[in-house]
């Protein structure tokens, strides 16, 4: 063991990687800082980065929001949130005190130019006091309706431009990025009026998950998977992102959004592109994103007439999850009692290129499904010749499962001989578990993404053309579903695996959804 550690420590490449990962001190301005995202995700992530000394002492936060609270109360509220939501608890007082010294609050309306003047003064003051030297991240954590105003004000106040060539200004934009193709194009245009694309970081927190990044490592750092990662050996791919929770106090937002916009346009499309993309020439941001965009462009577009054959939607009614009875979607707070918003989507997609022609990709996501599980299953074809006849009857074709969460890991299902004097074959699992193999706690997705932004690495953020390509694909479905009112909603009880139409979608091809 010790030899291995010494080798790693002595490795100069590893040393430079480590050094590269510590950014210079900067200031993060969080617009909408009194909201949920700040307290549940952003501040806990920043606290943990500072606890692990991945961000330097001078790092500072300015909360910019409408609520009239001062810096002291803001800090107190954030401490409570970290105590409640951080992955490492309880908070270490010494770490918190140092971190909290850099936290400030500025009360302003988003459309008030004087608020941005005050912001500029505070930024200058902190630059001198904390050594941040004009390095800024602007984080849009407001409802999306406020994005255009804030972007425009950042432009008008001059804050979007770096003060001099040695410093930088970046903007992180939360999802949803637009609510359809047209609004995404418009938002991209508004952003481009003020920021250069390399200043823009569109966040999709799935890309910050360790297991999602590992899809690329698993595929491209190993020599043995790529040769079989194609239509010749793969029968089909299933991507499932299933949640057991309902709308969790976000009923109003969700009711205007629905599963297609909330999950498919971003998280599921990201998983799909990572599984299906070609190896990039190198691991820089544009090379990786070029390959992802190519996948989106190769997905066979649907016409509105085909939507019902390739996509199924559902909405949950009352039911039970585990031992708990839960209300139907229409009974959730903030949801219209006659709502036709979908809480479940299943789709079948084809990627029309040499690697994947005629290989279906089935994707599904929903709320109030029996359990929380996200995984990608690569289902391989049967062996070409049934050498073992009846003995192999209990064996399923090979499947490689990339488990995104929980029980993060990778499993390969294969056939093995049952011990005994005759040949009997059963399926067994070869299992790799992150927890067991590495024995370290996984960082939260936001930790990695916030750090990458401070380092100026946009590999794990979505580019403007990528966002638009994903919307373009979904438009026929959005249009068709907006035009044709569903007559059967609610069509799956909470605690079940979605509506009948979702099962029909795959079963008519002679396949089944995996039992999870
Ligand atoms: C968010 C969606 O982007 O992702 C939520 O808005 C969803 O509706 C969440 O619950 C799921 O994220 P995770 O990391 O819990 O899988």
Image (cartoon, rainbow, N blue to C red):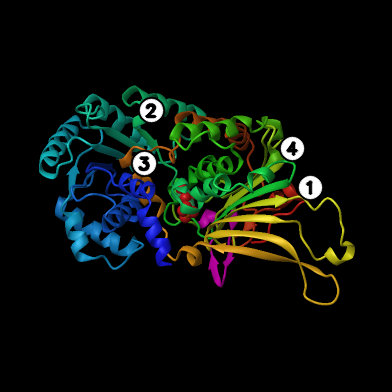
Dividing the picture into quarters, in which one does residue 157 lie?
top left
Residue corresponding to mark 1: 508
Residue corresponding to mark 3: 143
Q: Nearer the viewer, mark 2 or mark 3?
A: 2
Residue 164 — which label? Answer: none
Q: Residue at x 69, y 40 (%)?
A: 310
Q: Earlier in the sequence, mark 4 or mark 3?
A: 3
Q: Earlier in the sequence, mark 1 or mark 3?
A: 3
Residue at mark 2 to residue at mark 1: CA–CA distance: 44 Å
Residue corresponding to mark 4: 358
**Range of magenta residues:** 316-331
| Mark 1 vs 3: CB contact within 8 A | no
| Mark 4 vs 2: CB contact within 8 A | no
Q: Nearer the viewer, residue 491 or 185?
A: 185
Residue at mark 1 to residue at mark 3: CA–CA distance: 41 Å
Q: Nearer the viewer, mark 1 or mark 3?
A: 1
Residue 197 — which label? Answer: 2
């Amino acid at each position: 063991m010790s030899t291995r550690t010494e080798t790693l420590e002595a490795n100069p490449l590893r040393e430079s990687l480590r050094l590269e990962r510590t950014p210079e001190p900067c200031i993060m301005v969080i617009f909408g800082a009194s909201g949920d995202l700040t307290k549940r995700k952003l501040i806990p992530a920043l606290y943990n980065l500072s606890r692990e000394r991945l961000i330097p002492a001078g790092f500072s936060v300015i909360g910019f929001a409408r609520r009239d609270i001062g810096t002291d109360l803001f800090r107190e509220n954030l401490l409570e949130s970290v105590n409640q939501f951080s992955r490492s608890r309880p908070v270490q007082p010494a770490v918190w005190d140092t971190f909290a010294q850099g936290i400030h609050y500025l009360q302003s309306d988003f459309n008030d130019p004087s608020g941005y003047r005050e912001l500029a003064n505070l930024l200058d003051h902190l630059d001198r006091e904390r050594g941040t030297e004009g390095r800024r991240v602007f984080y849009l954590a407001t409802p999306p309706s406020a994005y255009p105003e804030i972007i425009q004000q950042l432009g008008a106040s001059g804050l979007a431009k770096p003060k001099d060539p040695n410093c930088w200004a970046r903007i992180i934009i939360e999802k949803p990025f637009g609510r359809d193709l047209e609004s995404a194009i418009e938002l991209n245009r508004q952003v481009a009026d003020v920021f250069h694309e390399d200043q823009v970081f569109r966040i999709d927190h799935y890309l910050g998950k360790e297991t999602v990044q590992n899809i690329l490592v698993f595929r491209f750092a190993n020599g043995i998977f790529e040769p079989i990662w194609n239509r010749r050996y793969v029968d089909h791919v299933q991507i499932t992102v299933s949640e057991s929770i309902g709308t969790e106090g976000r009923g109003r937002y969700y009711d205007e959004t629905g599963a297609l916009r909330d999950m498919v346009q971003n998280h599921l499309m990201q998983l799909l592109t990572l599984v299906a993309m070609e190896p990039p020439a190198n691991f820089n941001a544009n090379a990786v994103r070029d390959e992802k965009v190519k996948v989106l462009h190769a997905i066979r577009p649907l016409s509105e007439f085909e939507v019902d054959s390739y996509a199924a939607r559902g909405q949950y009614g009352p039911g039970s999850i585990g031992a708990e009875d839960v209300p139907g979607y229409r009974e959730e707070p903030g949801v219209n009692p006659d709502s036709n918003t979908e809480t479940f989507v299943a789709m079948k997609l084809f990627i029309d290129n040499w690697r994947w022609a005629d290989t279906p990709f089935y994707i599904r996501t929903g709320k109030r499904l029996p359990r929380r599980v996200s995984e990608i299953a690569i289902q391989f074809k049967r062996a070409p010749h049934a050498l073992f006849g009846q003995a192999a009857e209990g064996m399923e074709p090979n499947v490689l499962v990339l488990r995104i969460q929980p029980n993060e890991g990778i499993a390969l299902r294969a056939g093995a001989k049952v011990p005994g004097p005759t040949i009997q074959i059963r399926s067994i699992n070869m299992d790799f578990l992150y927890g067991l193999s590495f024995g370290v706690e996984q960082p939260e997705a936001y930790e990695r993404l916030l750090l990458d932004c401070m380092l100026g690495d946009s590999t794990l953020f979505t580019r403007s053309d990528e966002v638009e390509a994903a919307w373009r694909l979904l438009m026929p479905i959005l249009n068709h579903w907006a035009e044709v009112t569903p007559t059967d909603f609610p069509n799956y009880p909470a605690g079940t695996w979605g509506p009948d139409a979702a099962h029909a979608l795959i079963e008519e091809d002679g396949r089944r959804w995996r039992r999870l």
